[in-house]
Image (spheres, rainbow, N blue to C red):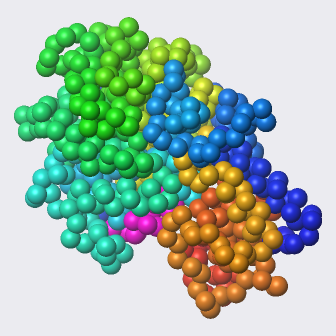
């Protein structure tokens, strides 16, 4: 397959690729398990196919228009805010969060899990290559205590993490995620590493400490464009109520108190407020029931910063009654609408589906639910963070297989049908120009990489005449691989085949796979 060429035909082809990329840009440790109660559990009929083109993943409202004056800032430049049912950037353009959960900081490892198997940089690079633009990063308040020593880390693979506290490791995750164009939502997942809690406070972690820790984080990351918001408390359930005025159980009132304190410290953040488990006898998923939020909304001191959040799961987590209904799966849309989707659909506020996932994407009930939900989220422009990156989530598994390296192709194929590019970086015009320039040969003064990338070994050579695949191991510009050029989400099969060929050539010349290989292992 042709790769780099200098003819006028080559430039035309390059322009086609650039247009496609612009369209997309516009557009052994303890396992974690999702437990269930008899009534409800803790926290998508036809499978949507992976997008045939990049433009298919872009909502119509985001399509470029020749009549609109050019805007200097990249799409997704912050601070982010809300406009009706959408999240918008600083220039008022709609953006979508299509991210992934990576847990561990909330557990007794006090570090993102999997660092015993791989380096932090490698893990984050693979998240970018997999198409996610945001990490929902769970933590517990115990993380900030002096005795909470990070563990479960191979320091030969992560030497620069040795000796760091849990909070300093959080700093490193955020810094390196930002270098790669990823955004981060901080998620107070647990009060201590032992377990989740029904309410936002316990006998070990008071409400005041919960708020104080949030204010500390909001102040620490103020002005840092990578951190976009606070998920105040994960999955309120059990006795949690909504808007009844009971100071011990009213989650809506507690979210207002914490949210306003956070915004006073950092007015740029979005505030993510999850639902509860039940409204009277209407039992749903932990954190997934927002049925009362429409009539009893959260009121924050800074306008246009509220994002509601729901969690939704399949029968692999708990065999809820709606999965047994004779009208399954056609009953699902009405179920979602009544519990959380109505808030976005009627323009009240955006809704993030902060957790959903399952082991099956096949033709069983869980697979049908999962595929149908992704299709629903895409059709209606919802934001999401998938549960999860980790393979050791007991009920759901992860995007990674058990070896912590191989991607689950079936899950990723479904998610890639609805993924947005990085928010705020890279700038679409600059990205397109870089691709076009690469088709005309390496620039005499290539731009500096947006993230540290190890150069290919000097002992390997590109193809005949110095040709190379865009985004492959011989491409001199590391920005291209970070953009996904030639990767599985590149819409041009010629580019994908070219990169696969160069990955194979690299393996043959060096005896080891290229560290960023996606086709040859």
Q: In this view, does 229 lie above or below 495?
A: above
Q: Residue at x 64, y 28 (%)?
A: 379
Q: Which residue is drawn at 56% across and 52% down?
A: 425
Q: Choose between 379 and 296: the one closer to the eye.
A: 296
Query: Along the horizontal axis of the image, is 206 left or right of 133?
Result: left
Query: Along the horizontal axis of the image, is 211 left or right of 471?
Result: left
Residue 195 visible from this viewpoint = no
Q: In which quarter of the image is residue 486?
A: bottom right
> Measured from the top left, where is residue 46 in percent x and y?
67, 30
> Measured from the top left, where is residue 348 in percent x and y?
47, 16
Q: Residue at x 56, y 35 (%)?
A: 91
Which range is magenta? 116-127
Residue 404, magenta (yes or no): no
Q: Choose between 272 and 332: the one closer to the eye.
A: 272
Q: Is residue 406 above or below residue 224?
A: below
Q: Is the magenta stretch mostly helix, strand or loop?
A: helix
Instruction: Tell me the quadrant of the picture where the C terminus can be found.
Output: bottom right
> Measured from the top left, where is residue 450 in percent x and y?
54, 64
Instruction: Tell me the quadrant of the picture where the N terminus can be found.
Output: bottom right
Q: Residue at x 50, y 59 (%)?
A: 180
Q: In this view, does 133 lie above or below 336?
A: below
Residue 126, magenta (yes or no): yes
> Measured from the top left, where is residue 402 in percent x and y?
43, 60
């Amino acid at each position: 397959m042709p790769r780099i060429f200098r003819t006028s035909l080559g430039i035309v082809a390059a322009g086609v690729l650039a247009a496609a990329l612009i369209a997309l840009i516009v557009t052994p440790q303890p396992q974690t398990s999702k437990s269930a109660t008899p009534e409800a559990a803790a926290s998508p009929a036809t499978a949507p196919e992976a997008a045939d083109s990049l433009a298919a993943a872009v909502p119509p409202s985001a399509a470029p228009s020749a009549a609109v004056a050019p805007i200097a800032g990249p799409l997704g430049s912050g601070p982010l805010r809300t406009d009706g049912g959408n999240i918008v950037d600083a220039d008022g353009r709609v953006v979508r969060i299509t991210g992934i959960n990576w847990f561990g900081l909330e557990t007794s490892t006090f570090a993102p899990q999997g660092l015993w198997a791989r380096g932090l940089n490698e893990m984050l690079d693979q998240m970018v290559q997999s198409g996610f633009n945001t990490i929902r990063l769970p933590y517990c308040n115990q993380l900030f205590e002096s005795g909470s020593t990070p563990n479960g880390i191979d320091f030969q693979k992560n030497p620069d993490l040795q000796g760091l506290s849990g909070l300093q490791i959080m700093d490193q995750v955020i810094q390196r995620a930002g270098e790669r164009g990823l955004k981060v939502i901080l998620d107070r997942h647990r009060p201590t590493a032992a377990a989740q809690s029904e309410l936002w406070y316990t006998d070990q972690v008071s409400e005041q400490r919960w708020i104080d820790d949030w204010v500390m984080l909001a102040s620490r990351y103020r002005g840092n464009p990578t951190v976009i918001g606070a998920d105040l408390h994960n999955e309120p359930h059990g006795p949690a109520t909504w808007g009844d005025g009971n100071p011990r159980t009213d989650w809506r009132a507690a979210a207002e108190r914490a949210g306003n304190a956070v915004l006073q410290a950092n007015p740029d953040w979005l505030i993510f407020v999850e639902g509860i488990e039940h409204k009277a006898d209407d039992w749903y998923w932990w954190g997934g029931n927002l049925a009362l939020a429409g009539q009893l909304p959260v009121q924050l001191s800074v306008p246009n910063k509220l994002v509601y959040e729901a969690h939704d799961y399949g029968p692999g987590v708990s065999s809820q009654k709606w999965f047994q209904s004779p009208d399954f799966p056609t009953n699902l849309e009405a179920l979602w609408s009544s519990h959380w989707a109505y808030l976005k659909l009627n323009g009240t506020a955006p809704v993030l589906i902060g957790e959903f996932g399952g082991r099956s994407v096949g033709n069983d009930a869980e697979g049908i639910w999962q595929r149908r939900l992704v299709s629903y989220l895409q059709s209606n422009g919802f934001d999401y963070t998938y549960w999860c990156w980790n393979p050791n989530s007991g009920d759901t598994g992860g995007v990674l297989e058990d070896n912590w390296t191989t991607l689950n192709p079936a899950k990723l194929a479904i998610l890639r049908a609805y993924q947005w590019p990085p928010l705020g970086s890279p700038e679409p015009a600059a990205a397109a120009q870089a691709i076009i320039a690469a088709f005309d040969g390496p620039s005499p003064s290539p731009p500096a990489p947006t993230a540290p990338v190890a150069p290919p070994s000097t002992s390997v050579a590109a193809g005949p005449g110095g040709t190379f695949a865009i985004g492959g191991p011989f491409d001199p510009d590391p920005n291209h691989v970070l953009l996904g050029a030639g990767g599985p989400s590149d819409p041009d099969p010629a580019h994908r085949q070219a990169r696969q060929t160069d990955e194979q050539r690299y393996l043959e010349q060096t005896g080891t796979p290229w560290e960023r290989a996606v086709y040859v292992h």
